[in-house]
Image (cartoon, rainbow, N blue to C red):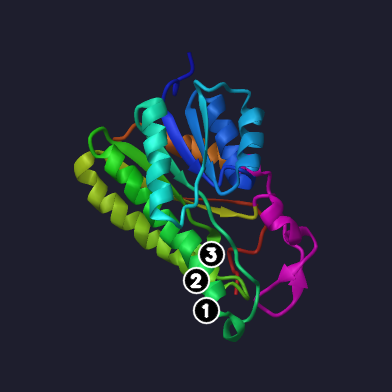
Amino acid sequence: MKEQSGRVVVITGAGSGIGRHAALALHGEGYRVVLAGRRAAPLQETARATGGTDDSVLVAPCDVTEPTSVHELFARCAERFGGVDVLVNNAGVFGPAVPFDEISPDAWSDVVRTNLTGAFLCAQEAFRHMKARGGRIINNGSLSAHVPRPYATAYTATKHAITGLTKAISLEGRAYGIACGQIDIGNAATDMTEAMSRGVPQADGSIAPEPTMDVRRAAEAIVFMAGLPLDANVQFMTVMATTMPFIGRG
């Protein structure tokens, strides 16, 4: 029997990229996985890729920006699996890559709703379910939680805010056996980072390609964080393509 057999993990943004690979890796370690995301079809693709059955995989379409939808997500999880042990708070969007003075209020609000409000709503609902039994929340930050990229103000601001959210949950979770950590991922090869290999704006104004790493490395890091006993916590972890321009960026 696998070490994590029977533990339940909710993964947002599970229809693609880091979320999909995290779901596959966690299911492979014996977790029962709840796949959340806006569109059912990509979630079904992830479910098929796990090779799991209804006893180990739940496809649960959800709009993380809507409180009622998030509430229903965790209610379905509790009904099917009896509770939740881990939340991987992964859903996020980059937003339009435009200069600071050209960001529209609507574009700003869209990024904030998904990346920050969505993470808050999911963490809050998970916290409520975990208060009686303990649990773990893993927030997907980004290297942009530390330093910005050009033309990414809304994304950068929300990822800096995720760090504050992580710390606040960690503090208030102590009384209930709820651990909260943050993983900051740099240039994992996904559809979202496809442009990296063609060239992206750099701090000096140039356009240059950037190295990427296999997205499975990020998934493996999430598996490690999720699998720790609740008396230990990875508060912050950075996993990145070794030679990407992060150290020294700017």
| Magenta stretch bounds | 188-217
Quadrant for residue 21, please give it: top right
User: How far apart are the alpha carbons under marks 1 and 3?
Assistant: 21 Å
User: How far apart are the alpha carbons under marks 2 and 1?
Assistant: 6 Å
Contact flag, marks 1 and 3 (Cβ < 8 Å): no
Which residue reaches farthest top?
Answer: 1
Contact flag, marks 2 and 1 (Cβ < 8 Å): yes
What is the three-letter code of the residue carrying label 1?
A: Pro
- Judge by depth and name the residue closer to the eye, 99 or 228: 99
Left or right of residue 125: residue 139: right
Crowd rating for badge 1 (residues with CA inside 10 Å; few <14, some 14–19, many 20+): few
Looking at the picture, how far across and down is residue 165, in whole percent? 36, 58
What is the three-letter code of the residue carrying label 2?
A: Ser
Disc 2 is placed on an element classified as helix
User: How far apart are the alpha carbons under marks 2 and 3?
Assistant: 18 Å
Q: Which residue is drawn at 48% across and 27% down?
A: 32
Query: With respect to residue 185, does 152 lie above or below?
Result: below
First of labels 2, 3 by sequence position = 2
Q: Name the residue under label 1.
A: 105
Q: Tell me, yes or no, if residue 246 can be seen here.
A: yes
Looking at the picture, how far across and down is residue 42, in whole percent? 65, 42
What is the three-letter code of the residue carrying label 3?
A: Ser
Quadrant for residue 67, please give it: bottom left
Q: Mark 3 points at which residue?
A: 144
Q: Name the residue under label 2.
A: 109
Looking at the picture, how far across and down is residue 218, in whole percent? 58, 44
Q: Which residue is drawn at 41% across and 27% down?
A: 80
